Image (cartoon, coloured by chain):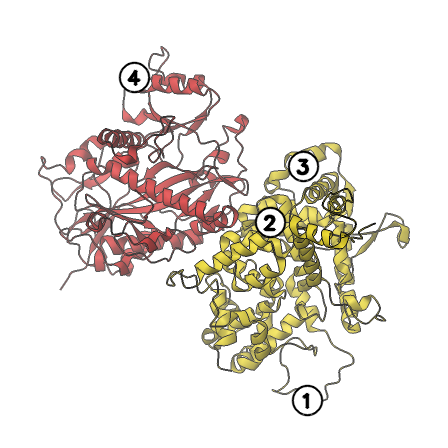
């Protein structure tokens, strides 16, 4: 008879705890035997197990790389799973994500893959989905070169390791980032410690506006394995609106309420509303776009969004530690510009589980519920040797985004009917055979 | 030779006359009539004229007896006219007392600095935080319901004792309403064997069965620019991508330069003068649309539409066929002197609590303010005005209430009786849905499917049918409640309902 799943978590969030309790799972302490660990990553502190398996420690990035490695002889047992991949930061740290995508593109180019095709301006046709980005201070000179090509452009500075919009600011003059200049004599920059590393990206100053307001998309993507890549997209993503009217005017560059859509920031604005929280469902977005722009361009937009998510995962798959004890639910942040082109802004490893409104609470509760149904089948004690291929019925609000195994076995056998391409939105209930790639429009 | 062309009051086409000029080489004097007919066809003007005429037919009531006085076109029944008159007096009294209490004039010119500020803020009036705490809506739907409940026809003597067989609802006037067999005939396109958007486009149904063909026909209708065909077409629902254009075609809105100019003119009126009703509008938007999950995004558009709407005197034309009469106000110190009377507000429509919800769903379809404005104005003068005025019209709110109660009493007598017994008269719950045409209660995509049919059938009766269908759908739960509050709770959340299946089942699949 199967025992009850024992769970541990390091955050007290009701959406999590309610889900565990509803399955009849038993909460245990960190130093006891556990089957399921849901941990949250705060900046650079990771909760994980030391080799003795009985003591939990918060460790730095360096140490975590060793913990899961073979050399230390540390092992999770077959009946234990964790909600993060050991080196998820390859995707979730802003600088590493960009680095991996750039590397991936170059590799494809070298192979002569059609995906890496470029247009007459040297821009990738299919893989240009991250705004031009540089690491600071390492790429400072490259950045300056790019900046001078377009001196009126605005750039956004983001600290590599922070979340929730902390430490972000906009610049439109080189003087504003003098201290990151490598040869600056007044630089107080001594160590190359990753804590102070920044990325600087071209700011998308022509975002698509709805009702005159800027917004971004938050989509949840569950990855159960990287090799072969198997990932699921949650149908119920949402748009986060800025409470203040968007203006590209330079006088408002300092007004974070205009530019950043993070709820953590918007929450403190005067106009923040606690009923809807400035959030819209993706199905509303789809209805609006279909009604005002037409169906084809809307479908194309959503197809592209799926595409860039899968490409970003493929980019990090080779370097990801595909530990079988792991799964991960990412929060993807995407901005759509006024030409209906989606841009990947960043990927979050621990998307916020805080609920800002009642609807939000329900959404996150269901998100965890569906995630657990896929990651821990039948709610029973996990066995890491399973093939990680859940049956269609348990997906809930998830839809298969990409299943590498299925894609390879199917080959060119693509069902044209599944090209409905509406995996998010009002008509998001279009059935799709699990495992088939979402798009027949992809190459 | 002169071609007489009475230009429609709302759709001036002065350019038509200049185009048909005798200097046009294609038009010969010998075959003038034929040539002009051909010219109209090839230039597309024939279609436009047809659409304009069709549009007028939809809006204006059929001509009545030549000896009938003009008020009969507004409302044939004297007691209804009287009731509407009293209601209007009440509203006006309420507005005037608010005015006096707060010492705010009904209208005043804005100082230049304020004008400039408003112009700058035109696109983001939502961020303004005027102190609205002292303002209250002039009335709310439930106040209006109380008035309707007390309507009586003094000529009607019902000698029978009140018994189970009599009408037990809140509305006690003997208007003729349709029964289910008549509704089935009227709404025959909603029948089970006819394809519908909202049912036959769901995930499980292959699009080849209905959806693809329906979309193709819709595109054809739009290409032909045929108003009448569009109206017939939308009875089966509009594909989302075609809806904005189809509605514009049915409502005969083409957003010509002169229309845009007119809107700009209204905008400048807003900038120059401040009206008391502006505060009422602000308050309404802040209370309703700003808190709505679907519509909060469009808050600023609502101000841009409603503030202009209040100043649009062309809206006064609809009072010719509405039972209502626009309130009059007098320049200070000249009370009662007709030369100093003006309509207040300029469009004669005093907004009530929830008024802005008529505009909100349209924001999903039109993002150009002037087009959005025109569509809303047309929807108002065709349909929405009937939802808050007392009349005997089949699409008027009184008839809708009676239709709702009759349907429920006839087809769900047990439920009706039970609810009545526990003090939960069904109309008390469904009234607010119908007054708002379900805006704010249904999910937007469902609401738009419902409004497709309002346009398609040129009637609001479908609102009453849907209200009854909702009760039928939740009948099991409702039978178990024991109080009005509990009944309200069962019906509090309609956001998950799918309207077309509900309507179809209620009309065509319920054993009567």
Ranked by sequence position, the earlier of labels 1 and 3 is 3
Between disc 2 and disc 3, whose residue precedes? 3
- Gap in Å between the C-alphas at discs 1 and 4? 96 Å
Q: Is residue B345 left or right of residue A287?
A: right
Task: State how far apart marks 2 and 4 are (Cα).
Answer: 52 Å
Circle 1 or circle 4, nearest the eye: 1
Query: How would you rate the neighbour count of disc 1 (Cα within 10 Å): few for under 14, some for 14-19, many for 20 or more?
Result: few
Q: Quadrant of residue B162?
A: bottom right
Q: Are marks 2 and 1 on the same chain?
A: yes
Residue at the disc numbered 3 = B118
Q: Secondary structure at mark 2?
A: helix
Q: Which chain is yellow?
A: B
* Disc 1 and disc 3 on one polypeptide chain: yes
Viewer-nearest of labels 4 and 3? 3
Location of mark 4 (residue): A190
Question: Which hue is chain A drawn in?
Answer: red
| Of the two numbered discs 2 and 3 in the rendering, the one whose residue sits closer to the viewer | 3
Q: Secondary structure at mark 3?
A: helix
Q: Position of residue B122 (x, y in %)?
A: 64, 38
Looking at the picture, how far across and down is residue A361, in whole percent?
40, 53
Q: Which numbered marker is on residue A335? A: none
């Amino acid at each position: 008879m199967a025992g009850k799943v024992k769970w541990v978590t390091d955050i007290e969030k009701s959406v999590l705890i309610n889900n565990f309790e509803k399955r009849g799972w038993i909460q245990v302490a960190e130093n006891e035997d556990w089957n399921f660990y849901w941990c949250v990553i705060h900046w650079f502190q990771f909760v994980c197990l030391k080799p003795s398996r009985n003591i939990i420690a918060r460790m730095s990035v360096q140490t975590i790389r060793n913990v899961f490695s073979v050399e230390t002889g540390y092992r999770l047992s077959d009946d234990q799973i964790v909600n993060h991949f050991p080196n998820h930061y390859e995707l979730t740290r802003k600088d590493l994500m960009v680095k991996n995508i750039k590397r991936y593109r170059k590799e494809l180019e070298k192979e002569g893959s059609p995906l890496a095709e470029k247009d007459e301006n040297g821009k990738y046709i299919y893989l240009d989905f991250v705004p031009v980005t540089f690491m600071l201070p390492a790429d400072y000179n490259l950045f300056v070169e790019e900046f001078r090509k377009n001196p009126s452009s605005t750039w956004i500075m983001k600290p590599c390791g922070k979340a929730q919009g902390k430490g972000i600011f906009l610049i439109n003059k080189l003087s504003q980032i003098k201290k990151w200049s490598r040869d600056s004599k007044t630089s107080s920059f001594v160590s190359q410690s990753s804590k102070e590393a920044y990325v600087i990206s071209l700011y998308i100053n022509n975002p698509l506006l709805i009702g005159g307001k800027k917004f971004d998309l938050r989509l949840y993507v569950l990855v159960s394995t990287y090799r072969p890549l198997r990932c699921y997209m949650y149908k119920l993503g949402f748009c986060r609106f800025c409470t203040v009217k968007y203006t590209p005017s330079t006088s408002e560059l300092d007004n974070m309420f205009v530019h950043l859509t993070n709820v953590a920031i918007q929450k403190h604005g005067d106009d923040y509303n606690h009923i809807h929280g400035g959030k819209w469902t993706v199905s509303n977005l789809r209805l609006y776009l279909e009604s005002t722009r037409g169906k084809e361009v809307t479908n194309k937009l959503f197809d592209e969004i799926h595409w860039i998510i899968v490409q970003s995962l493929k980019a990090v798959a080779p370097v990801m530690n595909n530990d079988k004890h792991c799964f991960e639910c990412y929060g993807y942040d995407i901005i759509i510009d006024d030409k209906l082109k989606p841009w990947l802004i960043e990927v979050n490893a621990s998307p916020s589980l805080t609920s800002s409104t009642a609807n939000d609470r329900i959404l996150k509760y269901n998100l965890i519920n569906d995630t657990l149904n896929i990651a821990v089948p039948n709610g029973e004690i996990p066995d890491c040797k399973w093939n990680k291929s859940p049956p269609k019925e348990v997906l809930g609000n998830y839809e298969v985004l990409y299943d590498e195994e299925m894609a390879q076995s199917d080959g060119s056998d693509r069902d044209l009917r599944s090209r409905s391409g509406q995996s998010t939105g009002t008509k998001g209930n279009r059935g799709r055979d699990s495992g088939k790639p979402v798009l027949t429009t992809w190459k | 030779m002169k071609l007489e062309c009475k230009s429609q009051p709302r759709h001036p086409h002065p350019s038509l006359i200049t185009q048909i000029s005798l200097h046009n080489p294609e038009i010969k004097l010998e075959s003038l009539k034929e040539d002009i007919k051909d010219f109209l066809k090839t230039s597309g003007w024939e279609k436009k004229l047809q659409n304009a005429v069709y549009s007028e037919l939809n809006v204006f009531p059929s001509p009545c007896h030549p000896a009938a006085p003009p008020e009969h076109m507004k409302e044939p029944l004297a007691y209804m006219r009287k009731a509407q008159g009293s209601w209007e007096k009440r509203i006006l009294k309420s507005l005037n007392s608010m005015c006096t209490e707060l010492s705010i004039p009904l209208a005043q010119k804005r100082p230049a600095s304020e004008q400039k500020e408003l112009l700058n803020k035109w696109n983001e009036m939502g961020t303004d935080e005027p102190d609205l705490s002292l303002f209250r809506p002039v009335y709310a739907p439930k106040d209006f319901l109380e008035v309707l409940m007390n309507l009586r026809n003094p000529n009607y003597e019902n000698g029978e004792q009140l018994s189970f067989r009599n009408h037990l609802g809140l509305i006690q006037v003997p208007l003729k309403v349709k029964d289910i067999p008549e509704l089935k005939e009227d709404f025959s396109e909603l029948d089970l064997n006819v394809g519908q958007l909202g049912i036959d486009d769901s995930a499980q149904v292959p699009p080849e069965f209905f959806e693809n063909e329906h979309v193709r026909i819709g595109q054809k209708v739009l290409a032909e620019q045929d108003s009448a065909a569009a109206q017939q077409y939308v009875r089966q629902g509009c594909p989302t991508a075609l809806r904005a254009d189809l509605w514009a075609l049915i409502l005969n809105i083409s957003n010509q330069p002169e229309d845009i100019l007119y809107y700009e003119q209204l905008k400048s009126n807003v900038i120059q003068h401040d009206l008391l009703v502006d505060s009422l509008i602000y308050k309404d938007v802040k209370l309703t649309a700003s808190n709505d999950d679907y519509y909060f995004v469009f808050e600023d558009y609502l101000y841009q539409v409603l503030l202009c709407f209040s100043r649009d005197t062309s809206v006064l034309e609809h009072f010719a066929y509405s039972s209502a009469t626009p309130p009059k106000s007098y320049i200070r110190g000249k009370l009662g002197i007709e030369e100093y009377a003006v309509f207040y507000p300029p469009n004669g429509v005093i907004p009530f609590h929830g008024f802005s919800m008529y505009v909100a769903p349209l924001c999903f379809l039109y993002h150009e303010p002037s087009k959005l404005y025109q569509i809303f104005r047309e929807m108002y003068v065709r349909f929405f005005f009937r939802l808050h005025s007392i009349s005997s019209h089949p699409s008027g709110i009184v008839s809708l209430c009676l239709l709702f109660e009759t349907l429920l009493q006839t087809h769900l007598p047990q439920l009706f009786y039970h609810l009545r017994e526990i003090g939960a008269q069904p109309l008390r719950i469904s009234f607010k849905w119908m007054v708002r045409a379900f805006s704010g209660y249904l999910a937007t995509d469902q609401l738009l499917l419902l409004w497709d049919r309002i346009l398609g059938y040129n009637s609001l009766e479908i609102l009453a049918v849907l209200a009854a269908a909702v009760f039928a759908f939740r009948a099991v739960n409702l039978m178990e409640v024991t109080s009005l509050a509990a009944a309200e709770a069962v019906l509090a959340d309609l956001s998950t309902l799918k309207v077309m299946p509900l309507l179809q089942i209620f009309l065509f699949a319920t054993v009567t």
